Image (cartoon, grey):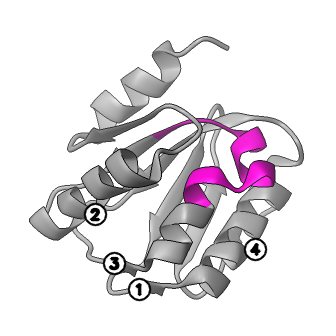
Amino acid sequence: MSQFSRKCDSAEIELKEDYVHIQFRDMSIIDLEESKKVANLIIELCAGTPYPFITNGLGITIRMNNEARDFFASYPPLTKVRKAQALLVNNMPSKLLANFFIKYHKPVNPTKIFTDFDEALKWIRSLPA
């Protein structure tokens, strides 16, 4: 495993040049315990430096319970290393989950939904340093 990537049962996390790329595995079930694993891997990888995140859900479906969504939205050690988050989705269940996450769980950091990777990358790179 690279010093710039981490893996767990539900996701692969990679530190790119100027952002963190999170790729959940198709059909993953994310509960509070799994969300803590993912968050801790991200925090470890960022080593205290804040980055924008791209969470890539293109072509996949995941199930995430309410506790996990709350945790991802507001867990202080995670929000300290997450400057902003672009959520990439392209199927109806993922779009509904992403909209629900933003509207009802109110992530602490700026969060926006995209269907195109290049547009998501453009947005996170347009944010203040």
Amino acid of disc 1: Ser
Where does label 4 land, which residue? 1
Foreground disc of the pair 4, 3: 3
Q: Reading the chain from its start, which is encountered first: label 1 or label 2?
A: 1
Q: Reading the chain from its start, which is encountered first: label 4 or label 3?
A: 4
Q: Residue at x 45, y 71 (%)?
A: 24
* Dot 3 alpha-carbon crowd within 10 angstroms: few under 14, some 14 to 19, many 20 or more: some
Taking the image as shown, residue 58 lies to the left or right of residue 87, namely left
- Above or below, comparing residue 8 to residue 48 in the picture: below
Where does label 1 land, which residue? 28
- Above or below, comparing residue 18 to residue 82 in the picture: above
Is there a contact, CB below 8 Å, between mark 2 and mark 3? yes
Q: Which mark is residue 62?
A: 3
Is there a contact, CB below 8 Å, between mark 1 and mark 3? yes
Q: Which residues fall within the magenta stretch?
A: 72-85
Where does label 2 land, which residue? 97
- Above or below, comparing residue 124 to residue 111 in the picture: above
State the image coordinates of residue 55 (x, y, percent, origin top left).
45, 53
Amino acid of disc 4: Met
State the image coordinates of residue 7 (x, y, percent, origin top left).
65, 76
Amino acid of disc 3: Ile
Is there a contact, CB below 8 Å, between mark 4 and mark 3? no
